[in-house]
Image: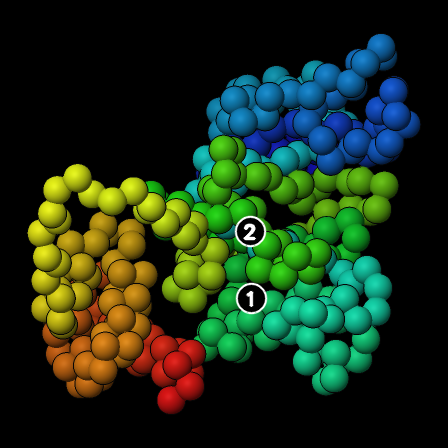
Amino acid sequence: MGLIGYAVAAVQRGWSVFPCNPCGTRCPQSGDVIDKQPHLVVPSKPYKLRWGEWATSDLDRVIEAWTYSPMANIAVACAPSGLLVVDCDVCKGPNQLEGTAYADLHERLGPLVDGTDVLREICERCGGDWSELMDTYRVQTGRLGMHAYYRWPAGLPASQASPVKGLVDVRGNGGSQGGYVLAAGSRTTSGPYLVEHDAPVRDAPPWLVELCRERPQPVRAKPLFAQPRRTGGISGLADTVRDAAPGNRSNALYWAARSACSDGIPIEDAVDQLGAAYSGDGGQRQALATIRSAYRNQSRKEGR
């Protein structure tokens, strides 16, 4: 299948794509390889596509672009595609995790630890299920790293901050444009991008959403007028779950349950009231599992 076939396949998954430079393209000025950069080089100077504006899921436009430039690499624009892509890189040298929260992995795994090892550790520390996390569409990168694709909750800002810089990065809907990744079928001077696990893209699990969501900026200005007191307790948390948007109810339930645990509310009360307020996918069985997971992770975080 030619590159146009891979571009069409990405669009058929509902993703927005745009062309990047073909494999081996060099910048005429610097001589640097720029085969991951948008779009094509003309003989006299590099021309970079304004990819945030160009990215499209219009099939006719995609076919036209790759008919004109059949060797162009394919990039997936994550924000308009509703994606969070976790990028696990290979290690770039010994003891790369020294000075991070994951330095102890070197004691268990040796001096060379790659991004997939770190992501597994993050998953375990957050109470996630590794097999479920990996049961999603994945691509092997040209450097033999991994891109794991997840659906991101609509309307929830994501951060572009790396969980572990240089080994576990994310591309989502944070920043001005949200970032992009090269799609399967692309090829750089490091190697080809290949489908590693051809599965449906699964929802980002709640713990991953919390890890990658954008943190609100602190408000420094004092209010001009007195603000009304916010009602709290389990009833207020239940209202948060009940009022959540349909695509974000599982996340709202998870973090309401963590708040309840932090406030010392017994898990039985959380199950009764937060579970009753939940009306998302999976029904009460899913609600119970989410609340238990939230209490377990919050208790672990607080050292109980």
In three-dimensional space, the C-alpha distance between marks 1 and 2, rounded to whole angstroms, equals 21 Å
Q: Which residue is mark 1?
A: 134
Among numbered discs 1 and 2, the one appearing first in the sequence: 1
Relative depth, front residue between 145 and 91:
91
Numbered label attached to residue 64: none
Residue 23 quadrant: top right
SS at badge 2: loop
Residue 281 quadrant: bottom left
Q: What's under tag 2, amino acid-wise? A: Ala
Residue 100 lies, with reference to residue 78, above or below; the image says below
Residue 120 in view in this figure: no
Residue 217 lies, with reference to residue 137, above or below; the image says above
**Image quadrant for the C terminus?**
bottom left
SS at badge 1: helix
Relative depth, front residue between 226 and 190:
226
Q: Which residue is mark 2?
A: 161
Spot occupied by residue 62 in the image (x, y as percentages of width and height): 58, 24
Spot occupied by residue 303 in the image (x, y as percentages of width and height): 42, 86
Q: Nearer the viewer, mark 1 or mark 2?
A: 2
Residue 94 in view in this figure: yes
Q: Residues within 10 Å of mark 2 (few under 14, many from 20)?
A: some
